Amino acid sequence: MKTTATIMMLAAALGASAASITSPSGKLQLTVDVDAVGTPVYSLDFNGKPLVEPSTLGLVAEETDFSRGFSIVGVDTVTVDRSWEPVWGEYSTIRDYFRELAVHLKADKPEREMTIRFRVFDDGLGFRYELPAQNGSNYLTLRDEVTKFDFAGNHKMWVIPGDYDTDEYVWSETTFTELPAALENYGRHSEAQRTGGTTVQTPMLLKTDDTTPVYVNIHEAALVGYPVMLLDTDTADYSFKAHPVPDRLGVAAYLHLPFDTPWRTLIVSDDARDILSSQLILNLNEPTKIEDTSWIKPMKFAGVWWEMFTGKIKTWAYSDDVLAKPGITDYSKLESNGHHPANTANVMRYIDFAADNGIDGVLVEGWNEGWEDWASYRKNRQFLFDKAYPDFDVDSLHRYAESRGVKLIMHHETSANAADYALQLDRAFRFMKDNGYDAVKTGYVGAIIPRSEHHGSQWMVDHVNSVAERAADYQIMVDSHEAPRPTGLIRTYPNWLAQESARGGEFESFGGNPPSHTAILPFTRLKGGPMDYTPGLFETRMSYYNEGNDSQAGTTLARQLALYLTMPSPMQMVCDLPENYARFPDAFEFIKVVPVEWSDSRYIEAEPARYITVARKDKNSDDWYLGAITGEEPRKAEVKLDFLTPGQKYEATVYEDAPDAHWKTNPQAYKIYSVPVTSKSKLKLNLAAGGGAAVRIAPVVK
Ligand code: NOJ
Ligand code: CA
């Protein structure tokens, strides 16, 4: 604990003008004031105990300082209780219930005005800066924020290192004081800009060092026109300070007033399950901008994809030629390398696989010109998004997919040349619509060219947001990879079905993801929106394909089924090869039937990195589904089925780890059985180390 003297000094610095509100139930109490130098300060109590100690607020621009000299000139409060219906998601209705405090601030010499708007929910806090048009300059070059989150103890935390370009890291479980040592273990991503020292990324999770611990997720909502927020950690003071990702000139944002920043968010509860069920971040986003959403269709999809990760000699590129013969610009003159999976016959095989198994879509990667040049960056324009390779017959695949009732999903890897992608975008989307594509997976692997922006900088945030918005004009659904991590904008653009923006399933082929990984992501990354994690991996050992690759997925087969519940996404991949599903047809049954949108969700038990058990009700039937995962430790999940309709008889089909299963030594050992259940039943599920269980609970129709 910090010394009482420091806390008392900070408290004494607060003036008499302090404004205070509580959350609707009174659980959270917010106090806002200005300190001796006119810097706005807030603090947050949870159940009558200080959680966030007095922490500074404000923005610093080259032209104007919005972090000091202020007095409070007025406050407005209002209580809002409303509900809304998402197009898809974990719930059919979401309640948005909060008390709001708008603190109006003024300063002179020079004259400045700013409002800080706070919303206090029973499950947390959101606040943002609102800069109205000023008497002085309305064009700001923002350098920094003084926003702080100052905690009272040496709390536990789950974090990944601060990085301007990537979030594809394994999580560290650490504390404030142990953080520097924990971050030292991370290598530097070849193209990424890792900040030095103790900077971390959001969303991150804290668990307070108290007898009744409090869980706090720190993130942001509605990231629009502004860079990603990282956090600089003060390991002695137990505090974080906002660190907006700058451009290469050190500028965080170019702002034109009036401007509202994104919301800074704290999801707070003494029950870990509430962190998972919280809808606070979605509630702080604007309602949908898309009026007719009938064309937005959640889906499962297979892909010409994992083949390229298995270590077999499969490539995205059609030819091995072009780098050797740099003069070649006409792809029809290239010779096929003979192992290019995005060819017409192979794609037809995937279309058949999808059609035969009720899978809605097929993603095809490596269909278009440009992959030969991947690493060279010789051209300003590398990828062409309307130019298929000679062995990929756009027309006949369009016709074939349509005849089999399957949708093809287009891939736009931009090699991070976002500026050029923006120039091609309309042509690319038109090409998609002309050829029957309604969904695109975008990708930004590499350093952002040509302006050397960062993945987290304002320019790139604007880019990905505008791609989602423009896609909606064409009625195209988007799944973006290597984009800035999501902040709930799926509410505003429900066609933006998923993002990667964390270390995904692809890493199972490059060293593997530890079992705890998918037990942390729902508490952190997923609070911003669904992840295209690519579940469904049945063959978890890469040596199966390639002796030279000893990478093994940190999972049992049964856990992969559970991920469809614990990592909910309206765009959910069925990632493994059709031939691997053919080896385990009984387990594959679960993937065939599991839905991708829900009318209700119940988090039954949860502890970060340790375990998650969740039940969800199918949006389009009376079926319930249950997913349970554990971390490194084996465990028994006990589930009371009291969420079922009383009096109704159901049949539960259980897919769980066999008694001798273990992610490392025996990952493919599972058991499938059926039992009759009612709302009075209890299920006991066996979870192996790194394991999981999945259950379908369907009403018995007489
Ligand atoms: C990285 C993406 O995460 C992965 O899904 C994709 O296959 C490759 N880039 C190639 O674009
Ligand atoms: Ca990736």
Image (cartoon, rainbow, N blue to C red):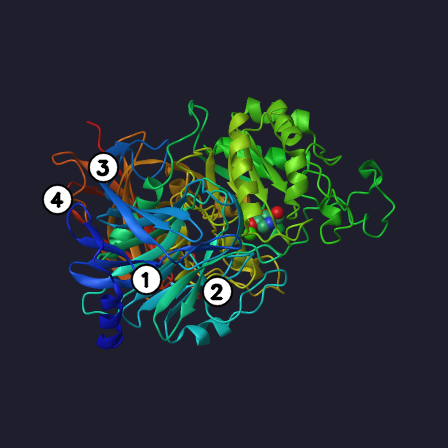
Mark 3 vs mark 4: which is more N-terminal?
Answer: 3
Mark 1 vs mark 3: which is more N-terminal?
Answer: 1
Q: Nearer the viewer, mark 2 or mark 3?
A: 3
Residue flagged by tag 4: what amino acid is it?
Lys
Q: Nearer the viewer, mark 3 or mark 4?
A: 3
Q: Is residue 191 visible?
A: yes
Residue 161, label in figure: 2
Residue flagged by tag 1: what amino acid is it?
Ser
Q: Circles 1 and 3: CB distance less than 8 Å?
A: no
For label 4, the residue is 680
Residue flagged by tag 3: what amino acid is it?
Val
Measured Cα–Cα span from mark 1 to mark 2: 23 Å
**Viewer-proximal residue, 555 or 248?**
248
Q: Secondary structure at mark 4?
A: loop
Residue 55, label in figure: 1
For label 3, the residue is 80
Q: Nearer the viewer, mark 1 or mark 3?
A: 1
**Label 3, ligand 2: CB separation under 8 Å:** no
Spot occupied by residue 104 in the image (x, y as percentages of width and height): 31, 46
